[in-house]
Image (cartoon, helix red, strand yellow):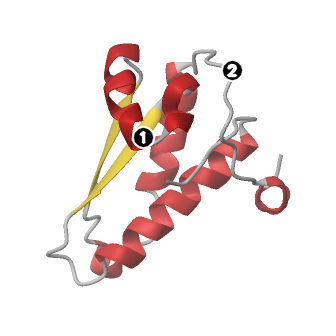
């Protein structure tokens, strides 16, 4: 799937199968976030990939849709960067589009 097709097809999904996501695909998704443009190339982020079911169950108190999520990617931004909101938004958008291109349903929360 090319980038424009992935942009057109991207939708928010709140129901998941619970099927595991291969590590290789998770790495591609996070790498797409890492490759996002940033102000002054600061890259003011850390990406935390959570696949452990026990940890996801602890996090689901924030949102019930997490119940069957195979993975959660937390994007932790450093607010000391002048453009941290814009940089984080670009990283997340890259990950949303990549996830769609790989055939996964995702939700920005």
Can you give x and y, in whole percent of width and height, for residue 73 in the image?
Answer: 42, 40
Can you give x and y, in whole percent of width and height, for residue 84 in the image?
Answer: 30, 74
Q: Which residue is mark 2?
A: 17
Determine whether, in the image, residue 48 is placed left or right of residue 2. Answer: left
Mark 1 to mark 2 CA distance (whole Å): 17 Å
Which element type, helix, strand or loop, lies under badge 2? loop
Front residue of 54/80: it is 54
Q: Which residue is mark 1?
A: 73
At x 37%, y 17%, the residue is 52
- Quick check: can you spot residue 70? no
Can you give x and y, in whole percent of width and height, for residue 48 in the image?
Answer: 31, 39
Can you give x and y, in whole percent of width and height, for residue 51 in the image?
Answer: 42, 22
Q: Residue furthest left?
A: 80
- Quick check: can you spot residue 75? yes
Front residue of 58/42: it is 58
Determine whether, in the image, residue 64 is placed left or right of residue 59. Answer: right
């Amino acid at each position: 799937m090319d980038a424009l097709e992935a942009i057109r097809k991207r939708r928010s999904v709140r129901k998941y199968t619970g099927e595991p996501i291969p590590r290789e695909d998770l790495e591609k998704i996070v790498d797409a976030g890492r490759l996002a443009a940033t102000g002054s190339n600061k890259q003011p982020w850390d990406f935390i990939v959570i696949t452990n079911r026990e940890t996801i169950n602890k996090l689901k108190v924030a949102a019930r849709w997490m119940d069957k999520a195979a993975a959660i990617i937390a994007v932790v931004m450093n607010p000391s960067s002048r453009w941290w909101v814009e940089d984080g938004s670009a990283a997340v958008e890259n990950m949303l589009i990549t996830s769609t291109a790989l055939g996964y349903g995702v939700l920005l929360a």
